[in-house]
Amino acid sequence: MSLADYLAKNYLTADSKPGRKSKKRKQKDCVATGLIIADDDALDWDRDGTDKADDDAPLEVNANGAEFRKAKKNTWQTIGAPTPSCNEQAAADAILKSAAAESQARALADEDAPTMENSAMRMESGAHAGLQTADQVTAQLKRKEAEERGRFLKDGDEHSGKGKETIYRDASGRIINVQMKRAEARKKAEEEAAKAAAELEAQKGDVQRAEKEKRREQLSEAKFMPVARYADDVELNEDLKKRERWNDPAAGFLEQKMGGKSVSGKPLYKGPAAPNRYGISPGYRWDGVDRGTGFEKEHFAAWSRRANLKNLDYAWQMDE
């Protein structure tokens, strides 16, 4: 191997080999051409690149040199992905087509998305989108209503929930047993009613409770009594004799009088006492001092005054 070949192979700086000129064509002299990069901000005085010892000086490469003529290996590099072949392109097209079909199927399965019917967009109400007449919109709405009614009748009561019991839930989402809740509410209402009746019964006195019990017994005995009761009825006469009347003139002639005990079994007061509206006699421990507000006395005085005025008015009318 010659020196020129060695330098051309390893350093690419060998000079052109002097050879014979071809007779067919003339060999042109190589003109050194290349890209020169000059630094405008150089601080030295040599700005035209004549200093051969400077490392930053541009490198001149001879495009027609022997190194380029003798190089037989292709030095071009492919940037990016290589061009696909026909089989690879077909497979990619098939994948894209399947993805488009899947997206279209999802769009059709979406209930909220408008449907396409006869190349026209159909809205959720059943009418087509776009400019159309009122009759067309009415017909489309009726068609949608008929379809829904037919689908509802086809499904039956199983999907509609008709005839099924309503499920109630509390704030936490747990199912409430309606029958148990109703039984608890009914029991609570009965307890409240019994409590109210007990309070009302506690407000009554011994005499009222005794009269109520006596009236219940009379009603139970009335089942066996005849419908008509005459003047010779012994029980009726005894009951009428036991009644006390404050204006009865013959009350003093009766031999049988009320005993010394009240209805509740306590002894009665013996002595004079001011009357009252309810006819209740004072207790047997009363000391005879009236500690009331005097309302009963004023009540009887007003009642007597009203009765006297009525009698006087009647007498004056008769005198005229």
Image (tube, rainbow, N blue to C red):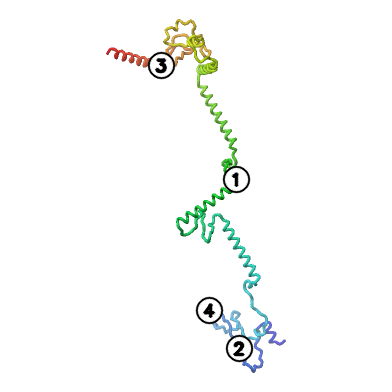
Classed neighbour count for the residue bearing mark 3: other residues with Cα under 10 Å, few (<14), some (14–19), many (≥20) = some
Give the secondary structure at mark 2.
loop
Q: Which residue position is annotated with label 4?
A: 40
Question: Residue at 69% across / 86% down in the picture?
Answer: 5
Q: Identity of the amino acid at label 2?
A: Cys
Give the residue at mark 3: 296
Q: Earlier in the sequence, mark 2 or mark 1?
A: 2
Percent across and percent down for residue 111 are 56, 54
Q: Quadrant of the N terminus?
A: bottom right
Residue receiving disc 1: 158
Looking at marks 4 and 1 on the same chain, the residue that comes earlier in the sequence is marked by 4
Q: Position of residue 103 (x, y in %)?
A: 59, 60
Q: Tell me which amino acid carries mark 4.
A: Asp
Toward which corner of the image does residue 81 lie, by quadrant? bottom right
Q: How many marks?
A: 4
Q: Secondary structure at mark 3?
A: helix
> In the rendered image, is residue 169 in sight?
no
Mark 2 highlights which residue?
Answer: 30
41 above or below 154? below
Of pointers 3 and 4, the one earlier in the residue sequence: 4
Q: Amino acid at mark 1?
A: Glu
Which marked residue is nearer to the observer: mark 3 or mark 4?
Answer: 3
Gap in Å between the C-alphas at discs 1 and 3? 77 Å
Q: Mark 1–mark 3 contact, CB under 8 Å?
A: no
